[in-house]
Image (cartoon, helix red, strand yellow):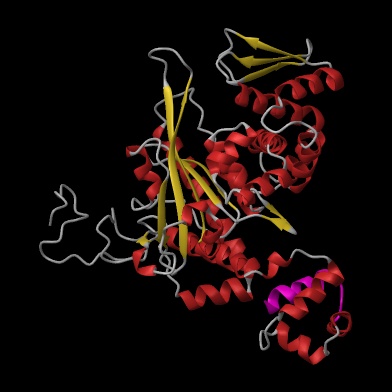
Amino acid sequence: MGVRLRRLREARGLTQAALAKRLEISPSYLNQIERNQRPLTAAVLLRLNAAFDVDMRIFSDSEGARLLTDLRAALADQGAEASAVELRVLTDEMPEIARSIVGLQARLREVSERADLLASRLSEPGRSMAPTPFEAVRDWFYDRRNHAPELDLAAEGVGSALPPGAMLSGLIDRLAGRHGVRVAVAEDETRLRSYDASARILRLGANLEPGRQVFQIATQLAFLEQGETISRLAAESGMGPEGQALLRIGLANYYAGALIMPYRAFLEAAEACAYDIDLIARRFGVGFETACHRLSTLQRPGASGVPFFFIRVDRAGNISKRQSATDFHFSRIGGACPLWNVYEAFSRPGEILRQIAQTPDGRSYLWIARMVRRGRGGFGAPEKSFAVALGCDLAHAGRLVYARGLDLGNPGLAARIGPGCKLCERSGCPQRAFPEVGRPLAVTEGEARFAPYSSGES
């Protein structure tokens, strides 16, 4: 914590003596704190907050844990090894260097993926490389703990004036009255939403139910009323044109969710029903997945909810959404852990599955997962199916209805999951698909679990 305090002091242009005076402690005591020889106590933290009005989460252990897991993954991606002690020293004492290593590896991975893709397409002239900004946009939200305060506050001001779960007519009136935009349902429209700026017409897909109509109208309202803020945030992201375009859509969708589920009303409803997702979804007229996504954004300073992490996967294991309000690490290489209950949800549609899971660092979590479907209607029409999962640290699990009947105090009952086989340190796991990155495979005679043409039964 001393390094973070020193950086905060230097950013404010203060000497140790000046800061010590503000905090009502001696300069020698402050010097010892900055050198990590004395702890940063709760009393000093309260004085820091009163003096500078800073977000106290910068002094949270979870910040270092997030960086540590990202750093370990970056080194493992290159086959490099470092002990837990070395990683902790680097993230605690030199966090900017650790972030630089993570950033360098992310850029190297992107370049490698582009090179591999280009090599595979050299024989196919005229085809362009697939876009790769999606990961950058997801990282943008991850780094901000899935919370965009400016858009959240603006959306809350609009949504709070409309009746929860019955916003359709109010939003249609707002579009017409403030912007002269008419909403029409296009029977032959295959897209969810299309906006004709010259005719001032917003056309919605014919198969959208009222709840999804509200979301699409709110998304268009974001571009009309918060366009400058969205463009500024996208420009400040440092992404290329494709990434910025995708980020603008993500921010507009964020605004729409925050409008339909206004922050304080949503948080109060969630706390009142012990985070029962079905009850929350019915109250605000949204689906299970949308309610889960909103729950992962409740990190307003001074009024935060349970810090959730949210993930959506398909049957092939592709992660199409991942958002985290805390330090849970989503693997970027080698897929996710097959012991995670999010994959079991596909075999038990309609059920909410619960799982107490422990990661290799010894931390335990409560996960709930459920399969969700989307269809366009009509016989033979294609249908999408996903599994969504929402998780939180076990320390917060007692606030959730889903913890009822579970023995939260017995770590021996927890499923031993990991960040994905290529990063997982666990030995003897029956589901390991291949060795950990950077670890030599010790093969004994008769052991063929990872060998080519193996039956897997050795």
Taking the view exactly as shown, the residue that stands out farthest to the top is 188
Q: Is residue 441 above or below residue 245?
A: below
Q: Residue at x 57, y 49 (%)?
A: 275
Relative to the observer, which residue lies in front, 32 or 149?
A: 149
Residue shown at 69%/27% (left/top)? 166
In the rendered image, the vertical position of residue 450 relative to residue 288, given as above or below: below
Q: Where's residue 143, x and y in %?
A: 63, 54
In this picture, residue 343 sits left or right of residue 262: left
Task: Report the quarter where the N terminus lies.
Answer: bottom right
Residue 197 in view here: yes
Q: Is residue 2 magenta?
A: yes
From the viewer's perspective, is residue 348 above or below residue 46?
A: above
Query: Which segment did they paint magenta?
Result: 1-15
Magenta stretch, overall SS:
helix
- Does residue 417 show up magenta in the picture? no
Marks counted in the figure total 0
| 83 versus 154 height, above or below | below
Measured as percent of width and height from the top left, residue 67 is found at: 57, 64
- Apparent side of residue 436 relative to residue 212 in the rendered image (left or right): left
Residue at the farthest left position? 446
Q: Position of residue 247 (x, y in %)?
A: 66, 38
Q: Quadrant of residue 197?
A: top right
The image quadrant that residue 152 belongs to is top right
